Amino acid sequence: MIIRPAEPLDAYAIVDLINPLIRNTAVTFTTEEKRSEDIAAAIRDTGAYFVACEGAMILGYACYFPFRSGPGYRHTKEHSIALSSEARGKGVGRRLMAMLEDHARAEGVHSLFAGVSGENPSGVAFHRAIGFAEVARLPQVGNKFGRWMDLVLLQKMLSLSH
């Protein structure tokens, strides 16, 4: 397995990975499926997408993006990560996040956030295991499948300066 920067052609595999999670799970609050052309544009424009591959098969992806708008937040990013069911529990997520964090550090990112559904305890546990700390639990801010869900915010400092 290799971890590498994503290429625009990887967008098709990324949407095949994330859209079933959007449709069928509460790991994300969004109900709008991703479009490959939008993902391809984000890959081209940001350079902050990474994929885990086994041969030609994409096992997972991770990316980061602005946490909030405005220049005061330029050193803080939020990330997203998704793995295929075959890749879970095999260290793929850890390796993806290591590459993502290295890239973010090189770009001057100081703080990285994860917004995890309260209905995704394994996602919270994963982030804690790789050094993220829970900094907030926002009750009932997400609504999907006709129910209110909490958002757990986890944060990891990437640089030593405070």
Image (cartoon, rainbow, N blue to C red):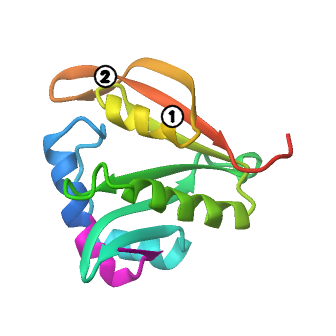
Residue at left offset 47%, top offset 61%: 95
Is 65 placed left or right of 72 in the picture?
left
Residue 32 percent across, percent down from the top left: 24, 50
Query: Which mark, residue 76?
Result: none
Please report whichever mark, 2 or 1, sits nearer to the chain's N-terminal start: 1
Tag 1, which secondary structure? helix
Check the picture and name the quadrant holding the N terminus.
bottom left
Residue 46 percent across, percent down from the top left: 54, 71
Determine the CA span between mark 2 and mark 1.
20 Å
Q: Quadrant of residue 145?
A: top left
Residue 2 percent across, percent down from the top left: 40, 76
Q: Which range of residues does the magenta coloring cover?
A: 1-14
Residue wearing tag 2: 149
| In-front residue for pair 98/10 | 98
Q: Is residue 70 above or below residue 15?
A: above
| In-front residue for pair 34/118 | 118
What type is the residue that disc 2 sits on? Met
Q: Is residue 134 above or below residue 6?
A: above
Q: Residues within 10 Å of mark 1 (few under 14, many from 20)?
A: some
| In-front residue for pair 62/140 | 62
Magenta stretch: includes residue 5: yes
Residue wearing tag 1: 128
| In-front residue for pair 159/30 | 159
Q: Quadrant of residue 132?
A: top right
Residue 155 showing in the rendered view: yes
Is 96 placed left or right of 68 in the picture?
left
What type is the residue that disc 1 sits on? Arg
Question: Which label lies toward us, 2 or 1?
Answer: 1
